[in-house]
């Protein structure tokens, strides 16, 4: 799967009830697939930011943007191609860490610059933030240890600096 | 009315409607909207009490189609709101400016499954241009102003405002507010900036393409009417001498009697309109959206045509058919821009010689006019004949509203539309039962115009109850009921594509008795069964103006609408009237 398929669209929306439903409803009724979705307040209380990743091979990007623009509560749309964006995603994961494998796991955590958030004698909870593809790879490296719980945020992005 | 006067949200809502210039409201009261109905008594609004909320919605649409002003409907929460979802969807697909006020349970009760509660904004999100749930009485004048602004600017459409009961109920302190005359400066719409001016460079490119085209066609849609651009279109068409097709939504936007008018294209369009588009090298699409009923099978549609696509809604550009030049803008402004650009390029003298194209097109017109076979003695009436007699028995500025089905296509084909805003129908959603309430709304808005509803018997049975409204409210519309005892269009498809296996399309010959039914609703009623009775009955109906009139024409169920592009076929596979089919086969 080519990474270029996934474009990030960063929308600024009015911070009003039902706005997420309007955006989600639009995607569903127009048949656009969302790969990931992140919703959070912005630096201005009046506006929130909805960041999503769409597979441009499955959805016509121009139509996605134009249809989003028709939503009255959508104030701004920035479309970021992979080459023009710095994107990150956060993962929280709890991994089995018995005495036998603990040292090996700690080395992996250190290598990948993940953070230990909590631990007990059986498990370690850690956070890892990177590009989405790196999260995928890290997840695969952790899997042999035994993943008890895992959550990812969906990607957020800003335009790259020249 | 001065600012800062204390009043309830209910009074403010009614005053806001007056402030927006509303004169007629189509509505139906109920529990949650009760506090708004009380101040209506003391207002300047004419409230028309419908018999079903769907009627209110279609009346508001008919009013908007005929007058160009936004139609207003007001209903209660729950079932009142769900009953008006169909008209909202209809107005959304046909870009009809409309504001719908719905009552809602008190704000604090929302989400508790209260009596007559439904998630109105959630349900109507997909069928409105925008909707609002108002939380504070103080916001009412501003939000009503925003609703009218959104409904009438850019690509017009329906806007719904959901009003919780507590903020309009004068016995509740949450309804206290200070009146203000809301203006554009009060609006809080940071994400809404419709663009109307077309890009000048693109307009120049379009003018060059028009200059150089050998087989151009002006493909005109409902956007011309929404943009009040009929006069500009006439100027452009006459300047460049390019033939015009008017889609189902644009009938009347360019006069049928004009030499350049080819009439309606699409699934039931006439041969010349369909074929001119198919063989064109340049389609100049103005306020049209390449609807599947116009294009037929898309990959076979107008295969050699370049496309100039002008639309106020940028999402329409490239949505269905890729354009060569796509211009976002108001049709009137863009057409005026094209006219100016044509002049700058050297006027009409520098255009390509199109005499061959013009003679090809007029050859098709002569060879393949719309046609049907008159009924033999003793046979039932031909529906096309009834429409021809209606056309000839009424002035050309008569407003015609139709339902959906065969009678709609016959009317679009056989009426002669020579004036904009005289044709009202449900094009996008295809809502059966549209005609009677839409005609009532049109007549309420244009009381001095003659208004005929052309209806089928299937449609009539869906919304006939609004003739009670028309009688009681003294809105004397006239209804031509083409009764063939069948769901005629479905029957046609079953005949042509399901080997004449007629499944659930027969509606019965003698039940209901439409004459008794119409009379029971306070209408005059006339039944017509013989060709020689048709014109006198129409004349008689036109003399009755103190109540609505229903003229039942008993028509031949075997009649089918031709030409027809079969579903899934390309427009090159048009099937013409059986009497012309041999001639057509010689053509290819």
Image (tube, coloured by chain):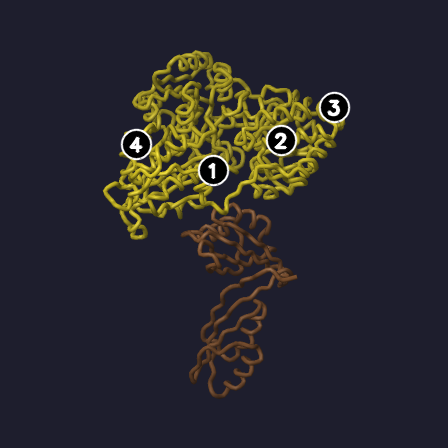
Chain colours: A brown, B yellow
Q: Determine the secondary structure under disc 2.
A: helix
For disc 2, the chain is B
**According to the image, label 2 marks what residue?**
B335
Q: In the rendered structure, which disc, 4 or 2, sits on the residue that comes first in sequence? A: 4
Does the residue at mark 3 contact the one at mark 4 (Cβ under 8 Å)? no
Does mark 2 fall on the same chain as mark 4? yes
Q: In the rendered structure, which disc, 2 or 3, sits on the residue that comes first in sequence? A: 2
Q: Quadrant of the C terminus of chain B?
A: top right
Does the residue at mark 2 contact the one at mark 3 (Cβ under 8 Å)? no
Q: Which residue sits at x=59%, y=44%? A: B319
Q: Work out how far the residue at label 3 is from the one at label 1, CA to CA, in angstroms.
A: 41 Å
Q: Which residue sits at x=28%, y=30%? A: B41
Are there few (<14), some (14-19), or many (20+) residues within 10 Å of tag 4?
A: some
Q: In the rendered structure, which disc, 3 or 1, sits on the residue that comes first in sequence? A: 1
Q: Determine the secondary structure under disc 4.
A: helix
Does the residue at mark 2 contact the one at mark 1 (Cβ under 8 Å)? no
Front-lying residue, B50 or B223? B223
Are there few (<14), some (14-19), or many (20+) residues within 10 Å of tag 1?
A: many
Q: Quadrant of the N terminus of chain B?
A: top left
Marks counted in the figure total: 4
Q: In the rendered structure, which disc, 3 or 4, sits on the residue that comes first in sequence? A: 4
Does mark 1 fall on the same chain as mark 3? yes
**According to the image, label 1 marks what residue?**
B157
Does mark 1 fall on the same chain as mark 2? yes
Which of discs 2 and 1 lies nearer the camera? The answer is 2
Q: Which residue sits at x=35%, y=37%? A: B3
Q: Work out how far the residue at label 4 is from the one at label 2, CA to CA, in angstroms.
A: 43 Å
Q: Which mark identifies residue B355? A: 3
Q: Work out how far the residue at label 1 is from the one at label 4, CA to CA, in angstroms.
A: 25 Å
Where is A159 relative to A106, above or below?
above
Q: Is residue B3 left or right of residue B493?
A: left
């Amino acid at each position: 799967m080519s990474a270029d398929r996934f474009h990030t669209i960063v929308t600024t929306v009015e911070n009003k009830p039902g706005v997420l439903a309007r955006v989600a409803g639009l995607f569903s009724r127009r048949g656009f697939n969302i790969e990931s979705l992140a919703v959070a307040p912005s630096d201005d209380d009046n506006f929130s930011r909805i960041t999503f990743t769409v597979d441009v091979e499955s959805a016509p990007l121009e139509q996605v943007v134009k249809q989003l623009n028709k939503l009255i509560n959508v104030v701004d749309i920035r479309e970021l191609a992979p080459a023009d964006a710095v994107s990150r995603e956060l993962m929280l994961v709890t991994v089995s860490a018995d005495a036998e494998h603990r040292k090996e796991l700690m080395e992996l955590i250190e290598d990948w610059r993940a953070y230990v958030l909590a631990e007990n004698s059986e498990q370690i909870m850690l956070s890892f933030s990177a590009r989405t593809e790196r999260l995928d790879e890290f997840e695969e490296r952790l899997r042999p240890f035994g993943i008890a719980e895992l959550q990812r945020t969906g990607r957020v992005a800003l335009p790259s600096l020249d | 009315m001065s600012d800062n006067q204390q009043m309830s949200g209910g009074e403010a809502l009614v005053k806001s409607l007056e402030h927006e210039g509303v004169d007629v409201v189509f509505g139906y009261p109920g529990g949650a909207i009760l506090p708004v109905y009380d101040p209506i008594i003391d207002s300047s609004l004419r409230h028309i009490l419908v018999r079903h909320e769907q009627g209110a919605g279609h009346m508001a649409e008919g009013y908007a189609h005929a007058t160009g002003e936004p139609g207003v409907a007001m209903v209660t929460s729950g079932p009142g709101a769900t009953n008006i979802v169909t008209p909202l969807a209809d107005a959304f697909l046909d870009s009809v400016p409309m504001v719908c006020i719905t009552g809602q349970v008190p704000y604090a009760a929302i989400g508790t499954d209260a009596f007559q509660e439904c998630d109105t904004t959630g349900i109507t999100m997909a069928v409105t241009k925008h909707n609002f749930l108002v939380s504070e009485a103080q916001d009412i004048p501003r939000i009503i102003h925003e609703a009218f602004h959104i409904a009438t600017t850019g690509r017009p459409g329906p806007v719904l405002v959901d009003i919780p009961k507590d903020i309009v109920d004068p016995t509740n302190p949450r309804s206290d507010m200070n009146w203000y005359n809301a203006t554009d400066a009060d609006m809080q719409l940071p994400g809404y900036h419709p663009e109307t001016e077309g890009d000048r460079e693109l307009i120049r490119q379009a003018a060059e393409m028009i200059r150089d085209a050998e087989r151009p066609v002006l493909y005109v849609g409902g956007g011309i009417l929404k943009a009040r651009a009929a006069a500009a279109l006439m100027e452009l068409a006459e300047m460049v001498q390019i033939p015009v097709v008017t889609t189902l939504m644009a009938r009347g936007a360019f006069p049928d009697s004009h030499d350049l008018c080819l009439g309606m294209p699409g699934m039931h369009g006439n041969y010349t309109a369909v074929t001119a588009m198919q063989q064109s090298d340049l389609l100049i699409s103005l306020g049209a959206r390449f609807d599947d009923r116009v294009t037929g099978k898309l990959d076979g549609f107008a295969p050699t045509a370049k496309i100039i696509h002008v639309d106020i809604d940028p999402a329409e550009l490239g949505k269905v058919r890729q354009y060569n030049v796509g211009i976002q803008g108001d049709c009137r402004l863009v057409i005026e821009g094209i006219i100016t650009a044509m002049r700058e390029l050297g006027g009409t003298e520098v255009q390509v010689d199109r005499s061959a194209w013009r003679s090809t097109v007029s050859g098709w017109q002569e060879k393949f006019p719309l046609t049907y076979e008159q009924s033999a003695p003793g046979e039932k009436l031909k529906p096309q004949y009834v429409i021809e007699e209606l056309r000839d028995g009424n002035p050309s500025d008569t407003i015609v509203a139709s339902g959906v089905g065969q009678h709609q296509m016959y009317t679009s084909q056989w009426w002669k539309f020579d004036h904009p805003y005289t044709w009202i129908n449900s094009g996008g959603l295809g809502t059966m039962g549209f005609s009677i309430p839409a005609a009532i709304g049109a007549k309420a808005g244009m009381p001095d115009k003659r208004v005929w509803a052309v209806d089928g018997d299937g449609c009539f049975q869906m919304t006939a109850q609004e003739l009670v409204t028309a009688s009681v409210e003294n809105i004397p519309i006239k209804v031509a009921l083409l009764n063939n005892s069948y769901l005629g269009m479905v029957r046609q498809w079953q005949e042509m594509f399901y080997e004449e296996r007629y499944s659930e399309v027969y509606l019965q010959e003698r039940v209901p008795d439409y004459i008794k039914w119409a009379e029971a609703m306070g209408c005059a009623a006339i039944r017509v069964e013989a060709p020689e009775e048709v014109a006198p009955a129409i004349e008689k109906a036109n003399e009755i103006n103190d109540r609505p009139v229903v003229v039942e024409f008993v028509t031949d169920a075997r009649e089918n609408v031709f030409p027809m592009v079969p579903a899934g076929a390309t427009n090159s596979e048009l099937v013409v009237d059986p009497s012309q089919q041999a001639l057509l086969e010689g053509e290819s």
